[in-house]
Amino acid sequence: MTIIDPPTTTTSLKMSDNHESPPPPSSSIERQQKVVRYDLYRGHPNMHLLPHSEMKTIMSALVNDTSWHKSLNYGANAGDKRLIIALRAFLDRRTCNDDRGDIINIESTTTTTNRELFITNGVSHGLELICATCTQPGDEVWVERPTYFLAPQIFKSNGLIVKALPMMSDRIDGHGDIGCVDIDRLKHSVEEEGQPPPKMMYIIPSYHNPTGRTMTWEERKRLALFAIRHGVILVADEVYHLLDWGTKSLEHHLNSTVLNIQRPCGMVHFNALMQNATQNPTINSAGKIGCCVSVSSFTKIWAPGRLKEYGYIDSQGGVAPFMGTMMRHAIESNLLDTYLDQLRVEYAERCALMCDILKDEPRISIPSLNSPVKRQGGYFIWVQFPSGFSSDDFLTYSIENYGVKFMAGGKCDPFAEGDDTSGRCIRSCARLCIADLDREELASATATFLLAFRSYMELVQPQCT
């Protein structure tokens, strides 16, 4: 997790007369060059939100702390002990109000020190290590549709066979449940039809990339129980779990007046159910026990201990020990807490800014605003167009005529070639990034996106419903 600078602007969330007017359709020369004026595709943080002054503060503090000298040498395989202690305390502090449901009674018999932490270079590195240490070429990994668009290639690079989890959108003609795993059908296919379970499942339970949906506590528990029962490694990409906010600022966008804004706990907490697995034959029917593994934005993994013995880790030691020392100072000095809070406010305002502009177009909806867990988080807003709409074709039109780039929904579907219900739903959606552009640019980009959409709909209206 990066530490950030305070926001440098206090731009109003509403459109104002100062916003730059959307440009007219481009000339033929510009269309040929496909000039991108506004990039809503790239999932990067804005440069002003990077930890410039905070890094200077940390490095200045290190001058008077000679303990950093050790971080120039090889590090412990799992990561520096002082960093892990600080990180564990930070995570406990930031998640103490998460909804743990009835597993809190089981967890109370254990301590947080029993949750193993392993420092990595980031989520992608964590996925790579899990594949290398816990799978074999030819094993299957089942993923959501849609999913984080770069994850399937990591799995394929390790020789894994990527298949789709059953999704609610597979059997429902519409978008209402897009991005929601059909857990009943998952259980039925394995437990009733005899389909072999996968070696691994990959999910994004909190503020899903790209859909923004958050799984309920009940959904998480059911998936965890399935994994434990059938010996499946359930990998939860929880990169945005702490980068979130309640939807109070978005209440006027919601259909429901009853808000459930408590954040469900991270998937690793459901490993508490494993202690019953060896005693409960209905859970341990596979003769082996699965587990939940969390990969997150703090370059850490709650993972099996075999990572410490993996060849290149055992050879080189833990990764990035010097950066780990700086992160420890960020945690111990409360810089990380302070600026994470500021970052949450910044992104909440950016989310509200984009939603306020998009609400003027009734043919575009934001499914995550109507999900059971009334929280938002992360970098992206997933928008849904009318049925039959092609976001790929619209993307081409938008870039060529208005200079607005975004991620077409099909980019997030590893099985986009198919013409099934889920594929059609996904291809009629798009992912918009709220994090990269400056506030003024974000407002102009969203307004121009709407202008491009309305212009495009005039051309294709008869094909969409």
Image: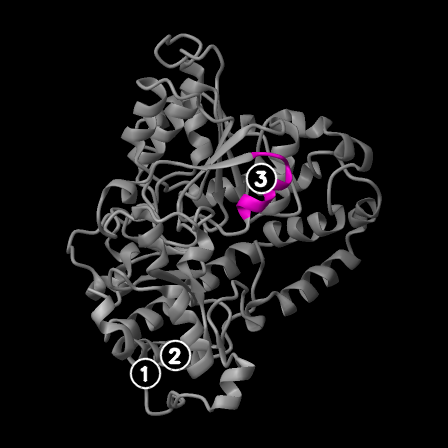
Residue position for label 3: 155
Residue drawn 64% across the image and 41% down it: 157
Mark 3 vs mark 2: give the one in front.
3
Spatial distance from mark 1 to mark 3, Cα to Cα? 43 Å
The type of residue carrying mark 2 is Ala
In the image, the segment drawn in magenta is 151-160
Residue 157 magenta-highlighted? yes
Mark 1 vs mark 3: give the one in front.
3
Q: Nearer the viewer, residue 456 or 93?
A: 456
Is the residue under label 3 in contact with that under label 1 (CB below 8 Å)? no
Residue drawn 69% across the image and 60% down it: 58
Q: Residues within 10 Å of mark 2 (few under 14, many from 20)?
A: many
In this rendering, the answer to whether 400 lies above or below 66 is below
Residue 199 magenta-highlighted? no
Which of the 4 quarters of the picture holds residue 394? bottom left
Q: Secondary structure at mark 3?
A: helix
Is the residue under label 1 in contact with that under label 2 (CB below 8 Å)? yes
Note whether residue 425 is visible. yes
Q: Which mark is residue 443?
A: 2
In this rendering, the answer to whether 274 lies above or below 212 is above
Residue position for label 1: 15
Q: Earlier in the sequence, mark 1 or mark 3?
A: 1
The type of residue carrying mark 3 is Phe
Which of the 4 quarters of the picture holds residue 352? bottom left
Q: Residues within 10 Å of mark 1 (few under 14, many from 20)?
A: some
